[in-house]
Amino acid sequence: MRLERALIGLHAAGVVFALVAALAWPRPGQAALLVPLGTGGLRGVLAWADRTGAPLLALDSASGRVIARISDNRSLLHALSQGIVPVAARAPGCRSDGG
């Protein structure tokens, strides 16, 4: 019985992770809010954006908020490895289709 509950809990956690990733994971070409988790802070985010060539769309140095356009999924995985969580920014001002 204990193994069955653990397996159900593992599946539930996987489903929750998949739903969160589907809603919050930015698509290539889409804008993303870059949230630093480590000690690098704003400098770490700016260094990552410079290394990957991600164009900055908005930069607020007072709050540390950085919004950049994501070029591909590989750069997203690199961001995660650097302690930066990219969150999809679906605001009308962040669209790339001119709308």
Image (cartoon, rainbow, N blue to C red):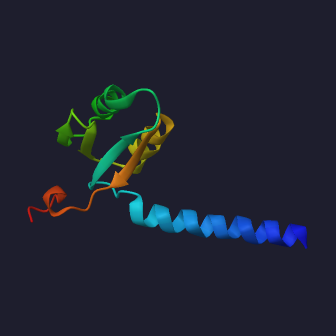
Question: Which x, y percent locates residue 20?
Answer: 48, 64
Number of numbered discs: 0
In the displayed structure, does residue 85 sit left or right of residue 55? right
Q: Which of 79 and 59 is in front in this view?
A: 59
Q: Is residue 1 above or below residue 37?
A: below
Quadrant for the C terminus in the image: bottom left
Looking at the image, the residue that sits furthest to the front is: 62
Q: Is residue 26 above or below residue 57?
A: below
Instruction: Name the residue located 56 percent from the left edge and 62 percent from the top edge.
Output: 17
Q: Nearer the viewer, residue 97 or 80?
A: 80
Residue 93 in which image quadrant: bottom left
Q: Which of 31 and 40 is in front in this view?
A: 40
Residue 18 in which image quadrant: bottom right
Looking at the image, the residue that sits furthest to the right is: 1
Question: Which x, y percent locates residue 19?
Answer: 50, 68
Q: Is residue 14 above or below residue 78?
A: below
Quadrant for the N terminus in the image: bottom right
Question: Which x, y percent locates residue 62?
Answer: 21, 33
In the displayed structure, does residue 36 sit left or right of residue 14? left
Question: Which x, y percent locates residue 90?
Answer: 25, 62
Q: In this view, does 44 lie above or below 97?
A: above
Instruction: Name the residue located 38 percent from the left edge and 48 percent from the top edge.
Output: 86
